[in-house]
Image (cartoon, helix red, strand yellow):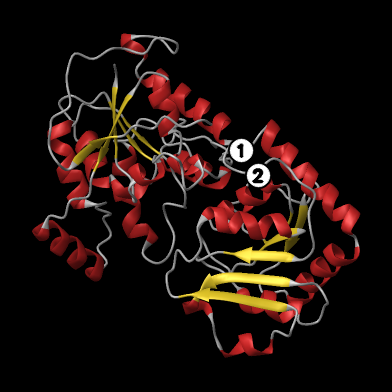
């Protein structure tokens, strides 16, 4: 069977456990490849002290060249002789391998999934040549965002290297649609603006529950008012998915307040809203492709717009029937277009096209090599439903 070597920024084996403790969309199609006949080998990040030291030094020096996870890429080297394809659901991990492929030193095709713009922040012009070099070593670079896909294609003209790959929730993990309750729940640990949400909620009667790491809690939280509950925890993971689902089930809407940023943010919580069938209120982020207002599933709010959040919260509180209809449309949107099964099928098509030389999309090529027994790699039993 074909072997896919997977390098990621977190342990995918944890998400493949049985019974699952998290939805399978965090596997980014890896479980689906396994079911379609691929052997998936997860390359571990067993620490290499010298490489870790060098990587920290390079990051501190803010070198224009991105290196990726040096330890994980080093651990992948023994596997390359038997791998048919490298897949990185997080593109930032494998930049070193991309340079090797661009130089003709790596014969294994590379697929990366782009989350954020490649050129952002300072020194963009200095980084641009290195980004273009890395792109020459990537065979397919689908993106979670249309804007990022467009950027990739501008940096690699004439190749059509990237296209949007819509991410969607694992509907089998979430409960069947049930009518909403009351109030709004907001949970998250990256790029959130709970101060704006709390300040807006204090001017309404809408019950709001904020679930966040304790690092977000500031003196401003004391002015939120009795209708705002804050569940803060030292552990940044704070709540398990089954616990979050209980809060989402009791709510009428899900809020995703965010600070202005150049990267993709809030998409995971938006998938939760789709799967749970809940109306959504979300800060505008140009990298989120799902237009919540044109789809009729919720409201956009400008960054830092307290009045905008107040209007949206009041609507959810005062118009329960309309909010329930938004949630129902959100669930239908997930069932029809945005779900982990649809994402995985599109990924499978990309993988099959890259390996078409030895097989077809329905019958992928069967390599003769075998993966090594290095302890830094793990064969992932991803038998999960989409």
Question: How many numbered tags mark residues here?
Answer: 2
- In percent of width and height, residue 184 lies at 73, 65
Q: Residues within 10 Å of mark 1 (few under 14, many from 20)?
A: many
Q: Residue furthest front?
A: 19
Q: Residue furthest left?
A: 50
- In percent of width and height, residue 343 lies at 54, 33
- In percent of width and height, residue 148 lies at 51, 46
Figure quadrant of residue 306: bottom right
* Left or right: 49 as drawn, with respect to 349: left
Q: Nearer the viewer, residue 371 or 82?
A: 371
Look at 65% across and 44% down and name the residue there. Answer: 275
Rendered-image quadrant of the N terminus? top left
What is the CA distance from the residue labelled 2 to the residue labelled 1?
6 Å
Q: Cβ–Cβ below 8 Å for labels 2 and 1? A: yes
Image mark for residue 171: 1
Q: Give the mark nearest the N terminus, 2 or 1.
A: 1
Residue hosting label 2: 275
* Left or right: 176 as drawn, with respect to 206: left
Look at 69% across and 84% down and name the residue there. Answer: 224
Q: Give the structural element (helix, strand or loop) at label 2.
A: helix
* Left or right: 287 as drawn, with respect to 14: right
Look at 47% across and 22% down and name the residue there. Answer: 349
Q: Is residue 105 visible?
A: no
Figure quadrant of residue 333: top right
Q: Residues within 10 Å of mark 2 (few under 14, many from 20)?
A: many
- In the displayed structure, would residue 144 be above or below residue 383? below
Image mark for residue 298: none
Q: Nearer the viewer, residue 63 or 370?
A: 370
Q: Give the structural element (helix, strand or loop) at label 1.
A: loop
């Amino acid at each position: 069977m074909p072997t896919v070597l997977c390098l990621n920024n977190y342990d995918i084996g944890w998400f493949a456990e049985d019974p699952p403790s998290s939805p399978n969309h965090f596997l980014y199609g890896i479980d689906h490849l396994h079911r379609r006949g691929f052997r998936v080998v997860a390359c571990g990040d067993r620490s290499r002290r010298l490489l870790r030291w060098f990587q920290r030094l390079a990051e501190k020096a803010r070198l224009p060249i991105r290196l990726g996870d040096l330890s994980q890429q080093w651990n992948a080297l023994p596997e390359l002789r038997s791998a048919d394809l490298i897949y990185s659901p997080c593109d930032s991990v494998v930049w070193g391998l991309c340079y090797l492929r661009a130089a003709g030193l790596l014969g294994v095709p590379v697929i990366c999934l782009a989350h954020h713009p490649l050129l952002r922040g300072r020194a963009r012009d200095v980084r641009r040549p290195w980004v273009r070099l890395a792109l020459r070593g990537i065979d397919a670079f689908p993106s979670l965002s249309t804007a990022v896909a467009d950027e990739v294609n501008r940096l690699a003209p004439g190749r059509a290297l990237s296209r949007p790959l819509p991410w969607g929730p694992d509907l089998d993990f979430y409960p069947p649609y049930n009518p909403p309750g009351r109030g709004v729940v907001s949970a998250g640990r990256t790029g959130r603006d709970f101060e704006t949400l709390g300040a807006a909620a204090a001017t309404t009667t809408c019950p709001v529950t904020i679930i966040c790491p304790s690092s977000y809690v500031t003196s401003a939280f004391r002015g939120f008012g009795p209708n705002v509950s804050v569940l803060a925890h030292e552990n940044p993971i704070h709540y398990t998915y089954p616990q979050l689902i209980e809060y989402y089930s009791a709510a009428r809407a899900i809020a995703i307040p965010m600070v202005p940023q150049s990267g993709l943010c809030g998409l995971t919580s938006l998938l939760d809203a789709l799967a749970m069938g809940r109306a959504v209120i979300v800060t505008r982020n140009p990298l989120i492709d799902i237009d919540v207002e044109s789809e009729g599933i919720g409201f956009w709010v400008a960054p830092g717009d307290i009045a905008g959040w107040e209007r949206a919260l009041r609507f959810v509180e005062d118009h329960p029937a309309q909010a329930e209809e938004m949630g129902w449309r959100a669930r239908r949107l997930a069932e029809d277009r945005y779900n982990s099964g649809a994402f995985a099928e599109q990924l499978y098509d990309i993988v099959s096209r890259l390996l078409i030389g030895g097989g077809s999309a329905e019958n992928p090529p069967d390599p003769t090599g075998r993966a090594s027994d290095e302890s830094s790699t793990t064969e992932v039993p991803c038998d999960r439903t989409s």
